[in-house]
Image (spheres, coloured by chain):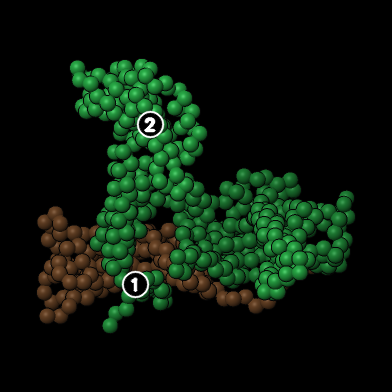
Chain colours: A green, B brown
Amino acid sequence: MPRFRFFSKKRGDRRTTSDIGGRIALAGFFAVLAIVGGSILAEVVNEMTAPEWRANHEFVETRCIVLEKYIAERADAPPRFRPEFKIRYTAGGEEYTTATYDAAGVYFSERATCEQVLEGFEIGQEYPCWYDPQSPSNAVLRRGYSWIAWVVPLLPAAFVAVGIGGLLYVFLTWGKSAERRALMQQSAGVDLFDTVNAGSRLPTVPSDRDVTNSPGTTLKYRIPNATPGWNSLFLLFAAIGWNTLVGWFVYKAVAESLEGKADYVLWFGLVPFLVSGGYLTFLAARSVMVAGGIEPTLVEISTHPLYPGGRYDLVIVQSGRLNVQRFSVVLVCDEEATFRQGTNSRTHTQRVVEIEIFHRESFSIERNDPLVARIELRVPESAMHSFQSPHNAVKWKLLVRGELTKWPDFERAFSLLVYPGRAGGPYA
Amino acid sequence: MNDPGITILLEGNRRAFEPGDVLTAEYRIDSLSLVDAKAIEASVIWYTVGKGDEDLAVHHFVRQTTDAGVVFDLRRPQRLRATLPSSPLSYDGVIVKVRWCVRVRLFPARGRELVAEVPFQLGRVPAAAVPAPPESIAVHE
């Protein structure tokens, strides 16, 4: 008997969920989104946006006498307020009395705002007002535009747009083979941020413009450091945030202990949080010490992109004052697979090539005497080219690793692109 | 009545190609009687297999349909010809694999669609493996 799963599960090359069932569910989801969003949008436009627009464009000006003024209260939590005026006016020869202020019927969170509005009008005085020629009993004392009448509809409008867009996608691809759907996506695939050579001579091979737009001083190109700099910053903020939070609980626990009301459960519960905070602090300090205390590593290469079987000159420059136990340069190739697990997206990385192309041990780098290593880089003849598709990738990089005395070890990554070819050149 | 089957033949039964090579294939529907079909699609595609979600791209695509009142005898071999691109090359990685194939899909007037595919190799990238502890072919100073 077939079983229904909320989340699909990969079984080798296939998924366990039914494609047609999934598409019906997806269509249902988008339909609900469009219907609910549309209903809310219609309500908001009908109640706020349209009346305000009509009051500004179609209502007819006349004079009215203010009979009463008061603050109307809506029993929300917290309550909301609105100024209201009972006015009398004449329209089309008939006299009308109504309670009104603005067309959108905006409520305020502050009572004082309404009181200010009320102070602008005197009972028994005459003021301009505007009435609806289609329904003269409907009038306003204030015209103009309120942001709420025009911004609030944007939220349900977004639901409608996503719902309709999703329904269009489902129906346009309904009954079409996986190949036809892929072809439609390829034809429509315009991604401004895409770095892959889509539609070029080398589909799925990333562009090397990040490397070739950076000239070197010794060799032709300087390879940018691909180690994300925000890692240190993120760790630092995470450590500060976490420890501030834990520190507040520690403060409470200490204060209670000093008052003779020690809460041992709280103290016991805090231990894992304190340990995590300590480890996070250690990671952040290490990362900041590496980022700030070790000067940049410069990597230059004789040409780019690389080809399987090719030989290239590399220059690695490491400056600063460092006591190095071991310094190495490693050529690596990583496979990256991104997959959905429930509602999360996860990326798994697997190293498939790791070749040390340079190492040196037990030496010092002085401020005016940097390490300058000239290396020959050989790309294996059997190398897979760099590859990037939406969920899968093959990435080549150089890793520069340093094991230091009295300072945290470091590893810096420099992305390389290996293009398809053989014997060190492209295919003919 | 026997259900129809799909036969795909790569020219010369060749299974390995280099970028820029021309792939020629013939495909036909094996059936004793005339097949009542809405459409037939033949494509040259690559797709990924492995730990990641599947990515699929179409390099060459042909669709024949009876929508316009055109009747064709699918039992007669149809021909497909495509010049293969320079990438992506076939790859048998550890968690990422790239596979190329010729796929034919038949949409019968009634019943479930039929699919058949013949894989082939593009390029000569050997299978990857999890590396042993770092090997060194280094210049040691």
Q: Position of residue A13 (x, y in %)?
A: 40, 74
Q: Residue at x 46, y 32 (%)?
A: A114
Is residue A200 placed above or below A391 in the rendered structure? above
Distance between mark 1 and mark 2 Cα atoms? 58 Å
Q: Amino acid at mark 1?
A: Thr
Q: Residue at x 50, y 69 (%)?
A: B96
Q: Residue at x 37, y 41 (%)?
A: A153
Q: Quadrant of the N terminus of chain A?
A: bottom left
Is residue A186 placed above or below A352 in the rendered structure? above
Work out whether residue A216 or residue A282 is closer to the camera in this orientation and state it. A282
Residue B93's tag is: none
Image-based side of B98 in relation to A101, left or right: right
Q: Nearer the viewer, mark 1 or mark 2?
A: 2
Instruction: Read off the residue under disc 1.
Output: A17
Residue A84's tag is: 2
Q: Amino acid at mark 2?
A: Glu
Q: Position of residue B58 (x, y in %)?
A: 36, 59
Work out whether residue B83 or residue A145 is closer to the camera in this orientation and state it. A145
Q: Chain for mark 1? A: A
Q: Residue at x 62, y 57 (%)?
A: A415
Same subunit: marks 1 and 2: yes
Q: Position of residue A113 (x, y in %)?
A: 49, 32
Q: Earlier in the sequence, mark 1 or mark 2?
A: 1
Label 1: how many residues lie within 10 Å, few (<14), some (14-19) or many (20+)? some
The answer to whether any part of residue A329 appears in the image is no
Residue B57 occupies which quadrant of the picture? bottom left
Image-based side of B3 in relation to B139, left or right: left
